[in-house]
Amino acid sequence: MEREIAWRVFAREYGDSTLLLRSGEERAPAYLVTPTGAKVNRIYAVGTLVSVENKGTEEEPMWIARLNDPTGFFFIFAGQHQRDVGAVLSSLQPPVFLAVTGKVRAYTPPDGDRMYVSVRAEGVHVVEGPQYDDWILDSARSLKERLDAWKILSEDPELGVEGLASHGVGRHIAEGVLLAQEHYGRPNLGWYRDMLVSALQTLLPEYDGLHASHMFPAPQEEGGGGEEVLSRVLEIVRELDEGPQGAIWEDILDRAAESGITPEDLEEAVEILIDRGELYEPVLGRIKLV
Amino acid sequence: MENGNEYAPHVEEIARVLEGVIDIGKDELENELRTYVEHYKVPLYVAKRSIVKKYGGNERLLGGMEWTKLNSLMPNTPSVNFVARVVTANPKEINGPDGPKRIVYGILGDDTATVPFTLWEGSFPYEKGDVIRVRNAYTKEWQGQVQVNMGARTVISPEEPDALPPGFTREVVEAKASELRPGMRNVSTTLRIVDMEKREVEVSGEKKVLFTGLAGDDTGLVRFTSWHDFGLKRDGIYRITGAYVNSWRGVPRLTFDEKCSCDPVEDDSFPSSEEIRGGRLIGLGELVEMGGAVGVTIRGVVIDIKPGSGLISRCPECRRVIQKGTCMVHGKVKGVNDLRIKAILDDGTGAVTTIINRELTERLTGKTMREYEEEARDAMTPEVVRDDIVEKLLARKLEVRGNATSDDFGVMLIAEDARPAAVDVESEARALLQEIEGGA
């Protein structure tokens, strides 16, 4: 049995994955194939731990931690079978730099069609800044290797694993890239290239202040991400809600855009907040705090 | 192929896959393929798959299929496709788990090499001289040689006798030290002997002298065995031709005898023995694929520190690790303390187990074994030693030089040197960025 490679993949690409390969055999490993073709069973992620919550009970804990990297968030999971890891996570005070090794974990709600991807932690270890930077570099290099493979594949889409290998593409990459091609078609490679560039820029002093995560907001569908938008929207309305008529919708829209919130997300957030009874619409085009 | 039109080879391939599945003319297939590609602008490989699927064929038998020459077969490949001539084929009865079973074993050849094969499932209505097309066979390594296996998923079909040139002329393979792979034959290479010893062995009751050691070039080191006295000298450079490569525990071994030639070469620009010994940096994916190597340098992050790391106790007789003062072989003994680390190093392309000895462990942790012994005594458990090692080394990147071998648990590297890897993140990031933006 060869040990599974610990892939270095950026959070955003990991979270964008929708292809899970699970063979029928018991105890056979499951693989997540990312849009650019990393075929991941084990992952090694380093980032800034930003939150840790126990979403289970005291007896049956289910720790969910969020780890930020230059592109988004990893969701780190430690349940009953990862009690040691859970114990470490629960003792940590965010923010800290954290290294995580873990296995792919994917969940599709019974009535949903979207797959939620997280990492079932095998081990976590507090690290320092240089290890985070080193991880970003390794992840960037890994992504670049895959993008290079796509470039070769775009010139000759009929190349198989051997064909790619003869162009110098490692087998572990070639296989995943072909699987990705079959499932995702041709992913938005320009987008992942830009993400890669932004991530690398975080390592260089001349780009100081231009943090990639501003350009690549984390997906907002799952758990905390959505809550973050909601609380930001609430804050914006609070700031703008001056007269008796409430805040003007256009002003909210502008302020939201400055915070990296799209009009669609803003509308959804306001709807949720109205449902929750935190906001109301006194007249059309005005929003007020309850 | 009847005509030279661009669709012809693809139509042939589709027809081959659909053979026995459906009776359909090649003209019809070609029309259909044209419609997909020219009218619907579907990529050729998608069109081929769609057509095969539509007629109930197995589309995995096409698309990206590579037809490999036998000399480039690698061991442990899950799916290989090739055209070969049957050199020998012998049926044999074996006792399988479900009772007696008929298999066929023999030798296949093409214009580049010959390989042994075994057919485990199905019939083999071919004989010596027949040319066959084999899809979805797999390879293993047996006694240092690549072996082709054909199972339930393998598809064999007959080919015209002239699909292969007659005979088995063997291509000469020119290779550098790091390119040598088990199963390669007729190898030519130029190497410097870095280390050598003369040994006497008994082969079928006959005393033979052989010379074994390490040889290398600018790409790395390889083990060698010479079954003939060519007058090899340490530090000498030799041009070796007609050699073959076998392996032991995954480590390739260049082997040559009196049928080969081995001549001294003068070359002042050839790397010195010291330079060759320094070890080249090799990716872990490449190392795992090779299965083993001598004198390589690797870099990887310590992603796990295994139990059995830290303070351990060894048998004073045989150096085996002992538990509770009892050696497997020598019974109750007074154990001798030792310090070591069993770490998993992973660089994102491969993972290896690395064994780090006492001296290197002391250097990496900055603590001596005596200090660790004291800490363990104070804490009344040796666990504190492992905890300290984890604290200091987990998630760190190390650079390790040593020899790697493989077994059922993967590749293991015994460290001769280990140090924290020096990575200049900023300049490497800048170089990578330039490469990306320059290549856009």
Image (spheres, helix red, strand yellow):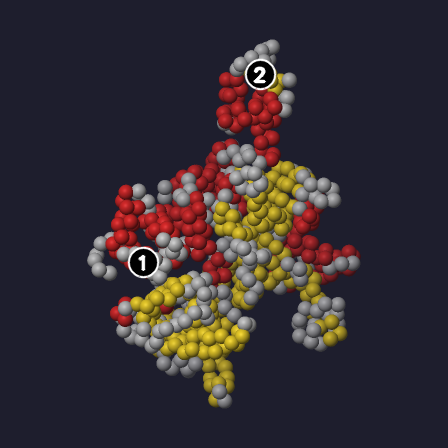
Q: Based on the displayed image, in which of its 4 quarters is residue B166 positioned?
A: bottom left
Q: Residues within 10 Å of mark 1 (few under 14, many from 20)?
A: few
Q: Is residue B328 left or right of residue A248?
A: right
Q: Residue at x 54, y 41 (%)?
A: A115
Pointer 2 and pointer 1 on the same chain? no
What number is the disc on residue B96?
none
**Label 1's element?**
loop
Q: Residue at x 22, y 54 (%)?
A: B5
What number is the disc on residue A281?
2
**Label 2's element?**
loop
Q: Nearer the viewer, residue B366 or B358?
A: B358
Where residue B223 appears, as percent x and y from the top left, is 47, 71
Where residue A183 appears, as percent x and y from the top left, is 44, 46
* Amino acid of disc 1: Asp
In the rendered image, the residue lying farthest to the left is B3
If the image is split into quadrants, where does the C terminus of chain A sit?
top right
Where residue B178 appears, as percent x and y from the top left, is 43, 64
In the rendered image, the residue lying farthest to the bottom is B205
Where residue B179 appears, as percent x and y from the top left, is 41, 65
Q: Nearer the viewer, residue B381 or B213?
A: B381
- Relative to B68, does residue A130 appear above or below in the rendering? above
- Relative to B363, does residue B423 appear above or below in the rendering? above
Q: Are marks 2 and 1 in contact (CB under 8 Å)?
A: no
Q: Is residue B377 left or right of residue A21?
A: right
If the image is split into quadrants, where does the N terminus of chain A sit?
bottom right
- Relative to A171, does residue A194 appear above or below in the rendering? above
**Count of all numbered marks drawn on residues in the image:** 2
Q: Chain of mark 2?
A: A
* Amino acid of disc 2: Glu
Residue that carries the numbered disc 1 in the rendered image: B23
Q: Nearer the viewer, mark 2 or mark 1?
A: 1
